[in-house]
Image (cartoon, rainbow, N blue to C red):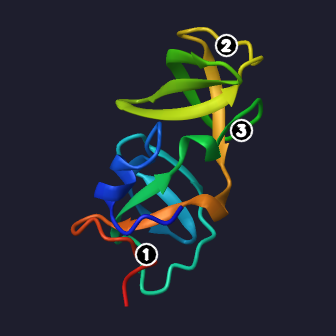
Amino acid sequence: NNPRNTFVARSVGSPPMNLIDGKLVSGRAVMTAAKFELPYAGASGTVTDGRALTFGIRPEDLQVEEGAPVEAMVHDIENHGVEKILTLRVGDMTLRATAPAQMRVMIEDQVRFGWDPEKVALFDHGTGMSLRHQA
C-alpha cells in the first residue's frame, strides 16, 4: 500500500495507482494540469509549500459520488463482476476509479469524485521516490 517509488506504483496493482503531478499548498493537493485541488492529510515532513510533487491514489480510494468536489467525464467503463473500473477524464488527464457494479453510469456521463486524504501517497516529482520512505 506504500510503494517506494512511482515505478512500483505504476507496476503493482490492477488497475495501478493513479499518479497526478501537482504541489502541496497550505495542506491541499493542488493538481497542476487538471486544475483542481483536494485535501491532503498525510505527514508532509520536509515538504514545503509549492514543491513539485506527484500524488498517488489507488483507484479503489477514489470516491465517485454525488456532491464530491471534482467533476469528471466518464471516458470508459470496464465491467468486472462485482465492480466496474471507470476511466475518468478531468481536463487532459485520465484517472481510474473503481465503483460498485450496480452503479448506473454510461460513457460521457458527468460524475463527481473525491478522495480520502489519508489514502494519498506523496512522491518527489524529480526522483519519483516516496516521501514516506525518505530519511
The correct choice, above or below, for 3 with respect to 9 in the image is below
Comparing 115 with 51, the one in front is: 115
Question: Label 2 sits on what residue type?
Answer: Val
**Residue 32 visible in the current orientation:** no
Counting residues from the N terminus, which is met first, the one under dot 2 or under dot 1? Answer: 1
Between 118 and 78, the residue placed more toward the observer is 78
Label count reads 3
**Mark 2: secondary structure:** loop
| Mark in the foreground, 1 or 3 | 3
Q: At 55% from the left edge and 24% from the top edge, which residue is drawn?
A: 86
Residue bearing mark 1: 49
* Residue type, numbered disc 1: Asp
User: Residue 64: horizontal and vertical position, in percent?
Assistant: 68, 33
Left or right: 4 in relation to 96 = left
Q: Nearer the viewer, mark 2 or mark 3?
A: 2
Can you give x and y, in whole percent of width and height, for residue 11 in the image?
Answer: 34, 48
* Residue under pointer 2: 105
- Across and down, in percent, residue 112 comes to 65, 30
Q: Which residue lies furthest to the bottom in this view?
A: 135
Task: Name above or below for residue 112 compared with residue 56.
Answer: above
Vertical arrangement, residue 92 with respect to residue 19, above or below:
above
Find the distance from the CA under tag 1 to the CA under tag 3: 25 Å
Left or right: residue 10 versus residue 1 is left
Residue kind at label 3, given as amino acid type: Ala
Question: Percent from the top left, x then y, of residue 18?
Answer: 44, 45
Q: How far apart are marks 2 and 1 (CA)?
A: 37 Å
The kind of secondary structure element at disc 3 is loop
Q: Which of marks 2 and 3 is nearer the N terminus?
A: 3
How dense is the environment of label 1, judged by Cα within 10 Å: few (below 14), some, or many (20 and up)? few
- Circle 3 sits on which residue? 68
Q: Taking 64 as reference, is 76 left or right?
A: left
**Disc 2 from disc 3: Cα separation:** 16 Å
